[in-house]
Image (cartoon, grey):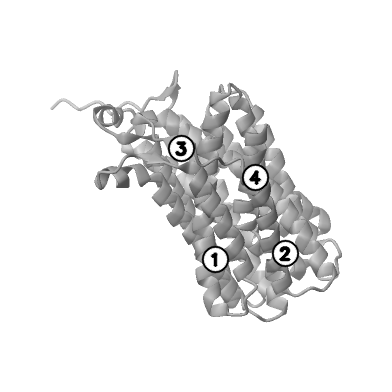
C-alpha cells in the first residue's frame, strides 16, 4: 500500500502541480497583467513541449545507452527524486517576477513531469508485481486527478483572499515540497529498473514488425494524437473561458477541481473494466465523451453546462492513455516501447499546437468569447473525427483472437 500511495502522490506532484498548476493561476496572472493571452499560450506550449521531449528521451533511453555502449539499467527511484525536487524548485521559481525566465521554467517543469510520470509508473508497477499485488497499480493513476483537485481548491482559496499570482506559485511550490517529503523515503535508491529484453530489439522485434501493417499503426497514431489537441484548449483555458461566460458567478474556480475529480473517477473505473473486448471501441467512447464535454459549455454556457463539461472532459482523460498504450502492446508487443514513443510524440504535438491555435483565433475574432468558441468547436470536431477513426479501424482491421487482421487485398485481374 505504501508504494501505491507513494506513486499516487508523486504523480499528483508531477502532473497536478508540475503540468497543470498553471491553469487555475492563469486568470490571476491575466488580471494582474503580468502576461497576455498570447504569452499564456506560449508558456502552456513550452510546458507541453518539455513534457514531450522528456517522454521521448525516457522512452528511447535504452536505445541511447546501447548506442554508447552503456548498460540499459535505469535507477528509477533516483530519477523520481530528482524530478520531484526539480518540480518543486521550478514551481517556486515562477513566483520570481521575471517573465523572460518563465518560458524556460515551464519547459523544464514539463521535462521533470515526464521523468516523474514515466519512472514512477515503471518502478511502482514493478514493485507491486513483485509483491503479488499488481492490481494496486491502478491507484497511482488517481494521482494526476488528485493533484488537479488540490491545486484547484488551493487556487480557489487564493482568489477569495485576493492573493497575487506569485503567492499561488509559492503555495504550490511549498505543497510540492511537502508532498515530495512525505514519499521521499519510499523511493529507495537501492532499487533499479531493468529494461526488458523485448525493448532491446533484435530478430524477435524484427519479426514482430509484420504483425501489423504500417497503415494500421499510422492510423492508430493519428487517432491517438487527435486527443491531444482535442482536450488541451479546455484544459489550459477553462477558468478563463468560464469567467467570460459567467463573470458574476462565485463558482467559477470550482470547475477545474471538478475536472480533476473526473480524472480520478475515470482512472478507477478504467482499471476495473474487464480486459476482454476491443479497446478501439472503448477509445471511441472516450473520445465521444470528451467531445461532449468540450462542447457542453458552448451548447449551455451555464453553471450546469460547465460542470457537466468539466466532468465529461476529465473522466476519459487517464482512460485514453491507459487504453491507447494497451492497444499498442496488442498490435506490436515486441516493439511496444518504440511505438508508445510514437503515440506520445503525436499526442504531444497536439498539445503543443492547441494553445497557440486558441490564442490566434481569439486575436482575430470580434470578441475573446467568439475566438474561444470557434477553437472549442474545432476541438470537438477533431475528437469526433478521432472516434470515427477508431471505429473505422475496427472495421478495416477486425480482431481475430488477439491480433488485427488486415482487409483482404483485391484479387488481381487476369489478362
* Distance between mark 4 and mark 1 Cα atoms: 24 Å
Question: Dot 2: few (<14), some (14–19), or many (≥20) neighbours within 10 Å?
Answer: some
Q: Is 34 positioned to the left or the right of 393 in the image? A: right
Q: Position of residue 383 (x, y in %)?
A: 56, 49
Instruction: Name the residue that disc number 3 marks.
Output: 192
Instruction: Name the residue that disc number 1 marks.
Output: 106
Of the 4 image quadrants, the one containing the C terminus is top left
Q: Are marks 3 and 4 in contact (CB under 8 Å)?
A: no
Q: Are marks 4 and 1 in contact (CB under 8 Å)?
A: no
The mark nearer the N terminus, 2 or 3, is 2
Question: Dot 1: few (<14), some (14–19), or many (≥20) neighbours within 10 Å?
Answer: many
- Element type at mark 4: helix
Q: Position of residue 82 (x, y in %)?
A: 52, 53
Q: Position of residue 68 (x, y in %)?
A: 25, 48
Instruction: Name the residue that disc number 2 marks.
Output: 171
Image: 141 above or below 364: above
Q: Position of residue 34 (x, y in %)?
A: 65, 80
* Distance between mark 3 and mark 4 Cα atoms: 17 Å
Of the 4 image quadrants, the one containing the N terminus is top right
The mark nearer the N terminus, 3 or 4, is 4
Instruction: Name the residue that disc number 4 marks.
Output: 183
The mark nearer the N terminus, 2 or 4, is 2
Q: Residue at the location (76% across, 63% down)?
A: 155
Q: Which picture quadrant has residue 63?
A: top left
Query: Which one is in front in this view, the residue at disc 1 or the one at disc 3?
Result: 3
Q: Are marks 1 and 2 in contact (CB under 8 Å)?
A: no
* Distance between mark 1 and mark 2 Cα atoms: 17 Å
- Residue 9 showing in the rendered view: yes
Q: Residue at the location (39% across, 38% down)?
A: 337
Amino acid at each position: 500500500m505504501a508504494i501505491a500511495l507513494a506513486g499516487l502522490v508523486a504523480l499528483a506532484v508531477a502532473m497536478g502541480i508540475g503540468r497543470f498548476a498553471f491553469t487555475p493561476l492563469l486568470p490571476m496572472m491575466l488580471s494582474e497583467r503580468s502576461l497576455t493571452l498570447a504569452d499564456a499560450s506560449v508558456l502552456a506550449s513550452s510546458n507541453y513541449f518539455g513534457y514531450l521531449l522528456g517522454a521521448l528521451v525516457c522512452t528511447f533511453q535504452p536505445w541511447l545507452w546501447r548506442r554508447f555502449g552503456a548498460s540499459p539499467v535505469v535507477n528509477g527511484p533516483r530519477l523520481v527524486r530528482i524530478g520531484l525536487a526539480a518540480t518543486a524548485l521550478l514551481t517556486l521559481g515562477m513566483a520570481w517576477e521575471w517573465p523572460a525566465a518563465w518560458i524556460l521554467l515551464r519547459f523544464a517543469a514539463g521535462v521533470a513531469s515526464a521523468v516523474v510520470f514515466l519512472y514512477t509508473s515503471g518502478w511502482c508497477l514493478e514493485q507491486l508485481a513483485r509483491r503479488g499485488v499488481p492490481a494496486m497499480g491502478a491507484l497511482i493513476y488517481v494521482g494526476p486527478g488528485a493533484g488537479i483537485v488540490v491545486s484547484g481548491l488551493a487556487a480557489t482559496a487564493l482568489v477569495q483572499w485576493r492573493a497575487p499570482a506569485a503567492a499561488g506559485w509559492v503555495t504550490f511550490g511549498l505543497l510540492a515540497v511537502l508532498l515530495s517529503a512525505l514519499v521521499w523515503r519510499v523511493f529507495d535508491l537501492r532499487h533499479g529498473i531493468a529494461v526488458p529484453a523485448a525493448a532491446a530489439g533484435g530478430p524477435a522485434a524484427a519479426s514482430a514488425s509484420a504483425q501489423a501493417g504500417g497503415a494500421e499503426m499510422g492510423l492508430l497514431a493519428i487517432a491517438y494524437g487527435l486527443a491531444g489537441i482535442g482536450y488541451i484548449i479546455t484544459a489550459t483555458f477553462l477558468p478563463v473561458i468560464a469567467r467570460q461566460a459567467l463573470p458574476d458567478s462565485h463558482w467559477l474556480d470550482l470547475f477545474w477541481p471538478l475536472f480533476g475529480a473526473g480524472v480520478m473517477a475515470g482512472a478507477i473505473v478504467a482499471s476495473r473494466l474487464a480486459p476482454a473486448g476491443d479497446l478501439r471501441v472503448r477509445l471511441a467512447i472516450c473520445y465521444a465523451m470528451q467531445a461532449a464535454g468540450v462542447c457542453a459549455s458552448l451548447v449551455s454556457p451555464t453553471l450546469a453546462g460547465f460542470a457537466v463539461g468539466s466532468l465529461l472532459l476529465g473522466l476519459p482523460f487517464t482512460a485514453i492513455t491507459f487504453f491507447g498504450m494497451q492497444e499498442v502492446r496488442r498490435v506490436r508487443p515486441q516493439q511496444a516501447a518504440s511505438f508508445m514513443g510514437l503515440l506520445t510524440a503525436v499526442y504531444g504535438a497536439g498539445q503543443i499546437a492547441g494553445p497557440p491555435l486558441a490564442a490566434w483565433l481569439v486575436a482575430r475574432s470580434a470578441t475573446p468569447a467568439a475566438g474561444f468558441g470557434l477553437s472549442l468547436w474545432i476541438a470537438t470536431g477533431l475528437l469526433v473525427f478521432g472516434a470515427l477513426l477508431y471505429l473505422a479501424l475496427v472495421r478495416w482491421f477486425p480482431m481475430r483472437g488477439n491480433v488485427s487482421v488486415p482487409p483482404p487485398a483485391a484479387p488481381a485481374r487476369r489478362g
